[in-house]
Image (tube, rainbow, N blue to C red):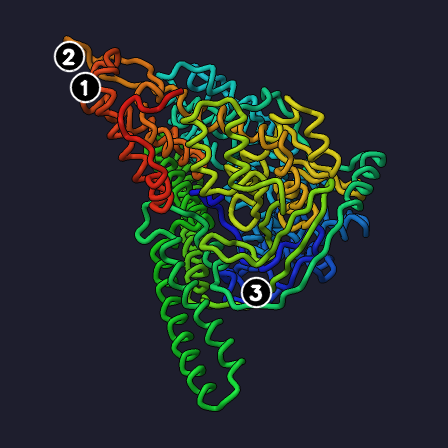
Amino acid sequence: MVKISGSPGPTPTSVPSVDTPVPPAPSAATVAPSRRSSAASSMAAPVAAGAKAPAQRKMEQQLSALPEGPTRQALMKALSSGLTPTDAGAIATALGGLSPAQQKDLSTLLAKAGLSTKASPRSDADAERTFLLKAVAGGASGATLKRLAEQIRGRPPSHQGFSFNPMSAAAGTQKRAAPTSAADAAAAKLKTAMDDIWGTDEAAVFEALEGLDPSQLKEVAKKYEKLTGTSLEDALNLELEGADLKRALTALGRQGPAAPTAPVQATTKAAATTTASAASASDVQKNLDAIQVKSKDEGTIQRGNAVELNDLIPRNVATWKPPKAKLYAPLKKAVEAHNKAQAAVDAATTEPAKKAAQEKLKAADAAVQAEGEKVKAWMKDHIDTNQGLRDAKAAVKVSERALSKLEKQQKKAKVPKDPVEAEKFRQAQKTALDAAKAKVTDAQARAKTVKDGLLARVDAYAPMVAVKQTRSEVTVNGTTVTMRDGRETAYTNSWSAVDGGAVSGDSATQVTSQLEKSGISEDRQKILASISGLEGTFSKVNTWDIGRVSWGFTQWTLGKDGNGTLAGFMRDLKKTDPAQYEKSFGKFGLDVDAKGVVLTRPDGTVLKGVAAAEAIRTDVKLAAVFMAAGADPAMQQAQIKYADEGKISGTRNTSVSVTGKDAEGKPKAAKLKLKDVVTSEYGNAIMTDLAVNAGSGARVAAAALEKYVKEKGVDPAKVKEWGPDAEKAVIAALENASRSERLTHHRKEGFSKEPNSFAD
């Protein structure tokens, strides 16, 4: 399933395991060059002209004692990028006390810095290396240092994890001033819950948001942004995913209720990798060994370069003109024409035939280049949506706000009357102001560097690439599935990812049959059948888009952090039918906890969240486990139940706070449910579809309803009178947020737009 959201990522053509050695540094064509690269390459610390301060001399002596290697290089780069001599000296002292084994472990972590989940180095990895060096100086080592590295790896420097001060022995334990109001307390609690280097405390987030009166939420959001420099909505989207994100946004008044899931418990902060018991690992090994795999190498084929497109512009916004799918379609068609023309050249047996085929090939190649230029122009138009660039620009705003705040504080500050003290005071102010201005300059320079690097990649974009093709037939629990890699779509972000499904026991006819047996209403059956026509059938799996792993007839996904809607389904199944869960998933090492998917490897290693999702993504056997599970009739009924309750009922029952006017024209606040207004078959169909495809059906509908009531000034108590007209406005908003091809599909299914035509 293609989600209308995004996250940054590099451009590999394969996804290695988490233990894959770090590749050589990429060329300037693929990674934005550091603006301080010359200083770093010279391996000489910046030294001011004139006499050197004692701290500077001491630091240089400590640095000279360090052996050449990645650790020394990282420290020198950090120093050239603004690390203070005092901090550098503290780090050098700590490095000198490490054992050879600890030095080796640190070198490995430094080498992996900046790796995304696709294991491709990011240009801003130096921020991570500096953080790790500070952590060593703060006493971190062994498992603690590894956990810190896992928490920030591949994250932008603006991520809240970097706010943790690893050089402070009391980091995270400083006393805060007592909040002065309920809004202050909630904002502080949210900051603490999402500021923890060990992960996000979801239970605390829910408690803070759900324990407030709705009238306080805007004030809490304002105070949170003042505390952190990040909007509350952005923070929630960064830290949460899937059902947890929906629940939080629901509480914030922006999203429908979460899909059914097990109650969220207060979570224990844990590392992304642990070790399972030997017995469980042994069972996993035995069960995986029983899976039979037959793979066939089908050579290589030219494809349009969708992977690079989606790496640079991961987002998919339906209202873009043209949207990504329409932009990419002509390039894909041109590459197909190239392949056809090349085949004709290869098959030609006479000179005239070969010459004619070569002319067609030349024309096809020209078309590929022309369409590639259109793609490049489109990417430049939308380059500001790249998450890495958005993070860099956000850092500029944070530094500018800090500078503005400091300037205001200094203007209000009282200057001491004593001349000597006054001069010291002014010098301290100037030093602080200069430092704040330097941070703004640095942030602006970094944003420019990031953008320049992205634009350089756009300029170097190759519209056509050779892609390896492999087809596999896999048998799991007696069920045979087939899959292939190298799938080309407008949303493909990995050529080594797969898609496929069961050979038997699953089809469109099976979907219809199982819906009829489910006991849900005919209109609900019709909606789910129509969405299945777009998403796939019960066993279908794809792992090539931003959903990481998408499965089932509504294509639930593991999402950006391994805790998406598919993890929600797994939690629900584990709770309601543990035997089915063990049969389909548990025996193969697949599990789930409050933080997301969990994978136990045969060697006893346990991967969690993103690491687990990425491991599943390109593992033929694990992808086949999901496909085979979808062919089980019991699992098919579980899918229908979860989709019906979560996607249809969950969306329809979304509560919306509205403010209209009573009969006397006075403001009147009330709470309505979307089902009070969205009463037609068509309205419910496209609202549910947007909930499935983009996770935003309830949010879009709720915003449209709230706007209608406010602008029209209608009485909320008389919803039956104005509801039909309001539904038209809601439908218009849903259509505007939806992809055109999906709307066309649902219209062909014959859904009625008449009010009250949906029968529950």
Query: Crowding near pointer 1: few (<14 within 10 Å), some, many (20+)?
Result: some
Q: Is residue 99 above or below residue 303?
A: above
Between the C-alphas of marks 2 and 3, the distance is 66 Å
Kindly identify the amino acid type of the residue bearing the numbered disc 1. Gly
Tell me the number on the disc at residue 713.
1
Q: Nearer the viewer, mark 1 or mark 3?
A: 3
Q: Quadrant of residue 602?
A: top right
Q: Which amino acid lies under the numbered mark 2 shown in the image of this protein?
A: Gly
Residue farthest along the bottom direction in this orientation = 351
Res 150 seen here: no
Please tell me how crowded label 2 is: few (under 14), some (14-19), or many (20+) other residues with Cα within 10 Å. few
Q: Give the SS element for disc 1.
A: loop
Q: Is residue 537 left or right of residue 361?
A: right
> Tag on residue 665?
2
Query: Looking at the image, is mark 2 or mark 3 earlier in the sequence?
Result: 3
Mark 3: give few (<14), some (14-19) or many (20+) Cα within 10 Å.
many
- Residue 156 percent across, percent down from the top left: 52, 46
